[in-house]
Image (cartoon, grey):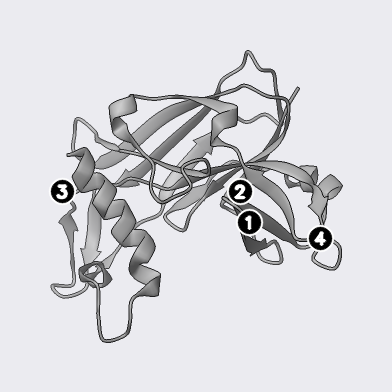
């Protein structure tokens, strides 16, 4: 089952890179965003646990039949962890940091994909007893002091009203002050904060 979920997660990540003449079966579906709640604090101690809870409907909209159907595969959301760092040559201001946390979750239900396991992991969701939702709950226990970002991919939306993004002010990139440079295994990608942010949560470990 774990391999199936892992392959599904990988296929979702690769959808954006498919050629137009190679449509994905997932293009027939409209997926709901996984709604995420995080422990609502801006500062934690190393003895604390940061709890993340996600929930999403077990139904997806099938464009072909134009109706909602039960999605039996389940979901495996992508979650990335980064430590904010002072800009180096104005290239990046965060670095992958999964190893700076103990992940409290069933180890058999966590997957790591790609060559850089230190940035992104995928927790499997579980079907609720009434089969109306898929959900997950995991904890992050910090191991090192610093300022951090929990980054969710397009499949999720953070519901917390305060995302503590003021923490980024001490790490602004010169001439790119509206962006974060995510460094994963030495490769940097950029995220702009010019639009509403619902996928990054900032916090400090003291």
Q: Measured from the top left, where is residue 196 in percent x and y?
A: 64, 61
Q: CA distance from mark 1 to mark 3?
A: 30 Å
Q: CA distance from mark 2 to mark 1?
A: 7 Å
Give neighbour class at mark 3: few <14, some 14-19, many 20+ (Cα, 10 Å). few
Residue 120 position (above or below residue 109): below
- CB under 8 Å between discs 2 and 1: yes
Give neighbour class at mark 1: few <14, some 14-19, many 20+ (Cα, 10 Å). some
Q: Report whether residue 74 is seen.
A: no
Quadrant of res 132: top left
Q: CA distance from mark 4 to mark 3?
A: 45 Å
Quadrant of res 197: bottom right
Q: Which mark is residue 197?
A: 1
Seen at 49% across and 32% down, the residue is 52
Seen at 81% across and 52% down, the residue is 87
The residue that disc 2 covers is 200
Q: Measured from the top left, where is residue 98 in percent x and y?
A: 54, 35
Q: Earlier in the sequence, mark 4 or mark 1?
A: 4
Q: CA distance from mark 4 to mark 1?
A: 22 Å
Looking at this view, name the residue that lies furthest to the left: 65
The residue that disc 3 covers is 72
Q: Earlier in the sequence, mark 1 or mark 3?
A: 3
The residue that disc 4 covers is 90
Give neighbour class at mark 2: few <14, some 14-19, many 20+ (Cα, 10 Å). many
Mark 2 or mark 1, which is nearer to you?
Answer: 2
């Amino acid at each position: 089952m774990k391999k199936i979920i892992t392959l599904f997660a990988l296929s979702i990540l690769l959808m954006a890179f498919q050629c137009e003449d190679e449509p994905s079966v997932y293009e027939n579906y409209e997926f709901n965003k996984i709604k995420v709640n995080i422990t609502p604090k801006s500062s934690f101690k190393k003895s604390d646990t940061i709890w993340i809870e996600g929930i999403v409907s077990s139904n997806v909209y099938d464009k072909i039949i134009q109706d909602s159907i039960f999605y039996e595969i389940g979901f495996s959301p992508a979650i990335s962890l980064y430590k904010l760092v002072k800009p180096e040559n104005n290239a990046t201001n965060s670095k992958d940091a999964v190893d700076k946390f103990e992940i409290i979750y069933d180890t058999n239900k966590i997957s790591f994909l790609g060559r850089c396991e230190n940035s992104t992991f995928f927790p499997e969701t579980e079907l609720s007893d009434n089969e109306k939702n898929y959900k997950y709950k995991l904890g992050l226990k910090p191991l090192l002091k610093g300022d951090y970002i929990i980054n969710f991919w397009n499949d999720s939306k953070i519901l917390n009203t305060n995302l503590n993004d003021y923490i980024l002010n001490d790490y602004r990139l010169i001439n790119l002050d509206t962006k974060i440079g995510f460094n994963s295994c030495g490769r940097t990608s950029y995220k702009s904060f010019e639009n509403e942010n619902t996928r990054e949560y900032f916090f400090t470990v003291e």
